Every structure is written in C-alpha cells, then in structure tokens.
Amino acid sequence: MAKNNKLTFSPQKVAKSFLSALPERSRSVLKKRFGLDAGSPKMTLESIGKAYKITRERVRQIENSAISSIRKSPAFTAYKNVFEELKNLMHEYGGLVHEADFLEHLSRDKDFQNHVNFFLVLGDEFARLKEDDEFRHRWTVNKDLTDKIHESLRALYKSLTEEDLISESEMTVRFLEHLKTLVKDVRDEELAKRWLKLSKKIGKNNLGEWGISSSPNVKTRGIRDLAYLILRRHGSPMHFSEVAKEITKTFGKSANVATCHNELIKDKRFVLVGRGLYALTKWGYARGNVRDIVRSIIEKDGPQTKDEILKKVLRERYVKENTILVNLQNSKFFKKDKEGKYSVA
C-alpha cells in the first residue's frame, strides 16, 4: 500500500475487518467487485457472474446482501470514525466531488483508491451520483449544495456560445458569479475549478482554454481545428508552413505542410490573405480574391480613388500593389470616372 498523509487509518486493515464476518463467497464477490485484492482491478457484475456461473442479477443480490451485513456488524460500528474522517475530507474538498479527482487527491495508489471507494459505498453519509449527459461520476455529502452547483453549472453553460474560448481564470470568475446568487459560502477559486470539472458540457482544450466541450475549439477533430487554435493564439496571419510546424510543436501531432494548406483553404474559418498567409475570418478578413475585395470595398464605401483602394486592399491582403492595379484596369469589372475614382462596371 502506498504511503499517504491524507488518512489516519489503514484502509486495508479496516476492509479486512469488515470482510472477516462474511461467508467465503460473499467476501470473494466484494473483493472482486471493488478490487480489494492487491493489484486486482474492479470487476463487472457480468464478469463475476461468468466466474461463478451465475447471473449478473444474482451477483448484485450477493453484493447488496454482503454490504447490508457489514453495515449491521460490530466492526462497522467500531470503525465509525473512518466514515467521519472521510466525510470531513470530502467537505474540505468541496462537499460535492469529482470521483476520480477526489480519490486521486487522497492517493495515487489504485489499491488505496479502491478501498476508499468501498468505504464510500458502505457509508450512509455519502451519495454517489452516476455519470449522465451533463455531469461526471461524483460523490456528495451535501444535497442542497449539490443542487445549487448543478444549477450554476447549467446556467454557465447556457451563457456560452460555440465560438467562446475563455482562459481558466476568466471561466472561474464567471462560474463564481453564477454561484454567488445561490451559494453564500464560496471559499476560493480552487473549489470553483474542482466543480467546473464535474460538467461534461463545459471543458478545456489542449491549450488550457475553456468553452463548450462539444465545440471544435475544445474537442478538436483534425488539422483544421488545431490550426484554428494556433492562429487564434498567434493573433495575426501565419504562413501555412508555420502553422503546420506549430501544430506539431504544440500538440505533438505530425502535420504535413501541403495537407495543412489544403485543409485551411476549404474551411470558412480561414482566409488566404496572400503569399501563403492565412488569417481568421473572425478578425474581419473577407474571403475571396483581390477582385472580390476591391468590389466589396467599392460597394461598401462608394467610388474610390486608386490610392484609397490600394490602402484598403492592402489591409485585407498581403499582395503586390501591381496585382491590385491590374484588377482595377479590367474594364469588365471596374470603370474609372473623370475624377479618377473607380466604381463597379
């Protein structure tokens, strides 16, 4: 058993005492179900049933009966302090805790974690809330607090859009604002961060930025999504070869340069602004070639002089001035009036 400083008792010793009064098969079923033998993983009802050649429902009955017997045993009464200590630790960790995080907090040793999980199942003080579409597996010792945290997490999720990407500190502040209307005692940001992890609707990407967990900004699915995060972090146009290098460097995923170029040019989130440079549409860049940009400028601002058009196009595209002038001189698309201003033909 790994050494730990979180508990004052030996989980292995307490579990042995609890199991000692049970019949052999009941004891064996609990050991398999909760992984109480050193180095043994927890087993499913179905796998235990196959081992004993009985139905999974029969295994469940044996498990429930064994737990009931332990709760009525003298050993259970003798070790009441075990459950009180765990209850206090759970309160300190937030009252409502992410199952895996809480067990990891107590010890990284899997055997240790399995024993503590066994005690949480035994204790009347603890309620396990199974994973669902909104939240992960969690334990609570405070139902009222749990309901309020759930409500705050739902409100936080509804306040986000698919495009939102927020730093952890800002997301924590937003969450605390929702909590303040429901929970009077919000002790610190660390608690808020722990509660944020409970939500399956909200998550963070590989850069530590938070948003809606199903959005491509958080749940990245390929080169395009990774490129979006790279460009967003960079804050200005990048050459597609540099984007590919940064994807490999930042995320440890090999990104072929040519593939990166082909993927970006097909995605509306990106704009090729010239010379292999890509920008994000959300920065205000319009998609299209130089002629399209000239046309959109004239349609928006009215007839423009050559210098005015050059200045505005060069904000949008990294191209040579001559490329713009060649387009302006195409009489099929643009015409020049007596004042030297260009309009759409």
Image: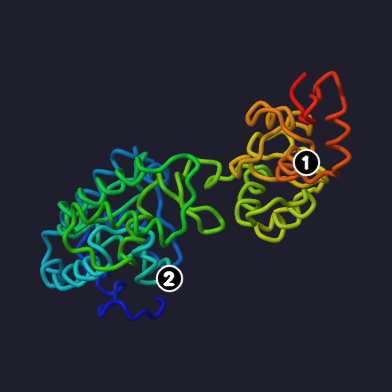
Q: Where is residue 174 shown, x and y percent of the image?
A: 34, 54
Please give left or right for residue 132 compared with residue 17 in the image.
right
- The structure residue drawn at horizontal position 76% and vertical position 35%, both measured from the top left corner, is 305
On residue 109, which mark appears?
Answer: 2
Q: Where is residue 258 shown, x and y percent of the image?
A: 82, 44
Could you say which is closer to the camera, residue 178 or residue 222?
Answer: 178
Q: Circle 2 — which element? A: loop
Report the amino acid beneath label 2.
Asp
- The structure residue drawn at horizontal position 64% and vertical position 57%, both measured from the top left corner, is 234
Report the amino acid beneath label 1.
Asp
Please give left or right for residue 104 compared with residue 208 in the image.
left
- The furthest residue to the front: 338
Could you say which is closer to the camera, residue 241 or residue 86?
Answer: 241
**Does 225 appear above or below 209?**
above
- Dividing the image into 4 quarters, which one contains the N terminus? bottom left
Could you say which is closer to the camera, residue 140 or residue 20?
Answer: 140
Could you say which is closer to the camera, residue 297 or residue 190?
Answer: 297
Q: Circle 1 — which element? A: helix
Q: Where is residue 60 shown, x and y percent of the image?
A: 28, 44
Give the CA separation, mark 2 to mark 1: 70 Å
Q: Residues within 10 Å of mark 2 (few under 14, many from 20)?
A: some
Question: Along the polypeptide, which appears first: circle 2 or circle 1?
Answer: 2
- The structure residue drawn at horizontal position 15% and vertical position 57%, both measured from the top left corner, is 124
Question: Which numbered mark, 2 or 1, is in the foreground of this view?
Answer: 1
- The structure residue drawn at horizontal position 63% and vertical position 29%, both measured from the top left corner, is 300
Residue wearing tag 1: 307
Circles 2 and 1 in contact, beta carbons < 8 Å? no
On residue 50, which mark appears?
Answer: none
Q: Residues within 10 Å of mark 1 (few under 14, many from 20)?
A: few
Q: Where is residue 236 shown, x and y percent of the image?
A: 67, 53
